[in-house]
Image (cartoon, rainbow, N blue to C red):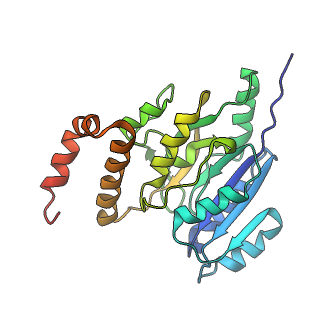
Amino acid sequence: MHNHHTPVFSIITVTYNADKVLEDTILSVISQSYQQVEYIVIDGDSKDNTHSLIEKYRDKIHILVSEPDKGIYDAMNKGIKLATGDYLCFLNAGDTFHENSSLQQIVEGLNKKNNELPDIIYGETALVDAHRNFIRMRRLSTPEKLRWKSFKKGMLVCHQAFIAKRSLAEPYDLNYRFSSDFDWCIRTMKKASMTYNTHQTLIDYLEEGMTTQNRQASLKERFRIMAHHYGFISTLAYHAWFIIRLLSKPGQ
């Protein structure tokens, strides 16, 4: 018997004062050929042109929240609470689906597999510049089979290309300011039994150099997250080189 899947994707866009890049993201969602989409936009009460931009596409946005928040992960938590779809997909301002048929291709792939819906769907990510030109693929490549221990090697799947069943999703931990998505992916993977590698490039990720200061803070936070999930000693052993690099940075 053919089991035809038509899951609903709750796509959550978190944005704050990002009117220069937000339109690309909105267009990429509303242009998807696959129609089973719930589009949620969480705006942190932007002071730029965001409001009029959202108004332009308001009829295509199912849920809109515009109010101050405690940062990106707080905004994402609001999105999770409001979502009603089968899957959660976080596409922040500046990020886009790789193609207008990206979701359609995922669903066709699921239907070929002809079994129950997987807990996690994942794929590759391309880095693009401000003009949406391809720069390169992500440095860390996606493993053939993703397990919760895969993340011992770092964020092997870009958060945007990690689509999780809503029923598995817990809130982001607001104690982490830079890498809560890393912790969230590990926690979600711990609960997942079935994963699906799409073998396709799902997302174009806008490469905006994170400041070195934030990068350091983010790496330290990731280390804490790994130590929490995988044990301090094994994390330390795996990251001996990384510790040496951190310690050798002047002014640390």
The quadrant of the image that shows the N terminus is top right
Left or right for 230, reference 205:
left
The structure residue drawn at horizontal position 42% and vertical position 37%, both measured from the top left corner, is 151
Q: Nearer the viewer, residue 122 or 247?
A: 247
User: How far across and how far down the image is residue 81, in percent?
Assistant: 69, 58
Q: Residue furthest bottom?
A: 47
Q: Residue at x 18, y 49 (%)?
A: 245
* Residue 226 visible: yes
Using the image as rendered, state which of residue 83 and residue 6 is in the foreground. Answer: 83
- From the top left corner, tell me how far across and down residue 210 is, in percent: 38, 62
Extreme right residue here? Answer: 1
Say above or below: 92 vs 51.
above
- Percent across and percent down for residue 212 are 29, 63
Q: Is 221 on the left or on the right of 247, as rendered?
A: right
Residue 235 in the figure: left or right of residue 63? left
Query: Which residue occupies the foreground of this view, 220 or 212?
Result: 220
Does residue 200 show up? no
Quadrant (top left/top right/bottom left/bottom right) for the C terminus: bottom left
Q: Quadrant of residue 167?
A: top right
Residue 41 in the image, given as x and y percentages of width and height: 69, 65
Q: For this view, does 50 lie left or right of residue 220?
A: right
Residue 243 in the image: above or below residue 17 = above
